[in-house]
Amino acid sequence: MEQPKMIDVFIMDKRYRVPAALTVMRAFEYAGYRMVRGAGCRGGFCGACATVYRMTGDSKLYVALACQTVAQDGMRIAQIPSFPANKARYDFATLAADGARLLEIYPELGLCKGCNTCTKACPQELQVMEYIGAALRGDIARTADLAFDCIACGLCTARCPGELTPYHIALLARRLYGAYIAPRSPHLARRVAEIHAGKWDAPVQELQALSVDELKQRYNARDVEK
Ligand code: FES
């Protein structure tokens, strides 16, 4: 049987030989690490697997999501599954669609140096500095729109020399947008009213009474939108 091509990766500065074509996350696991922290969805959505690396002989620091990035020969890797970022506390119910609140709640917005390091650090390739600029101007809708695909991996914060927390600022803007600015959905309101009126109680109770196998059968037989 043909042997897989092997490459060298350095995890926390220790060399491991792993098969080529594994993701960085799989390389960690092949090397014997158990991903208790630093792994979640494994599909590029949850932001739990923020990773920094250098290539041997290259001084540049690169960032990546471990579950989405193929390991390369000579990679020197460390994970940042959690970064101690400032997350402001606020009573969301007392807020309104007032863009000035972004700067009030996150005054460090004013410390942005315009260096664009945050944008370069984003594995989602978001225009982070641009949405920080929009937040500074109090433009909630623009901030929310530009940050829509943020998965809160925290790499922007880990690299920002102004010590901003772009992803928390973006989250606040998205929440404000969703609560106060986004057009209301009439069919959602209708469905919520139906739920409150008990229209769906019987179908839910029927599902609750099914065994796990019956639930699986129902799930597999469901209509799937093409
Ligand atoms: S594990 Fe969720 S984004 Fe990588």
Image (cartoon, helix red, strand yellow):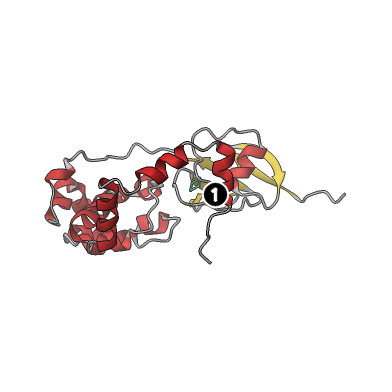
Q: Is residue 180 toward the left or the right of residue 51 in the image?
A: left
Query: What secondary structure is found at the residue carrying circle 1?
Result: helix
The relative height of residue 34 versus residue 178 in the rendered view (above or below) is above
Question: Which residue is the site of mark 1?
Answer: 219
Say if residue 114 shows up in the picture: no
Asked whether 110 or 135 is in front, the reply is 135
Q: Is residue 152 toward the left or the right of residue 168 in the image?
A: right
Asked whether 29 or 54 is in front, the reply is 29
Q: Is residue 119 toward the left or the right of residue 143 in the image?
A: right
Give the crowd class for mark 1: few <14, some 14-19, many >=20 residues within 10 Å: few
Question: Residue at the right extreme?
Answer: 1
Mark 1 sits near ligand 1, with its Cβ under 8 Å away = no
Asked whether 159 or 84 is in front, the reply is 84
- Indicate the position of residue 83 as horizontal and vertical percent values: 38, 38
- Indicate the position of residue 64 as horizontal and vertical percent values: 50, 51
Q: What is the count of numbered marks?
A: 1
- Indicate the position of residue 11 as horizontal and vertical percent values: 59, 39
Say if residue 146 shows up in the picture: yes
- Indicate the position of residue 97 as horizontal and vertical percent values: 14, 56
Q: Residue at x 18, y 40 (%)?
A: 90
Q: Residue at x 87, y 49 (%)?
A: 1
Q: Residue at x 24, y 52 (%)?
A: 193
User: At label 1, which amino acid type do we have?
Assistant: Tyr
Question: Residue at the bottom extreme?
Answer: 226
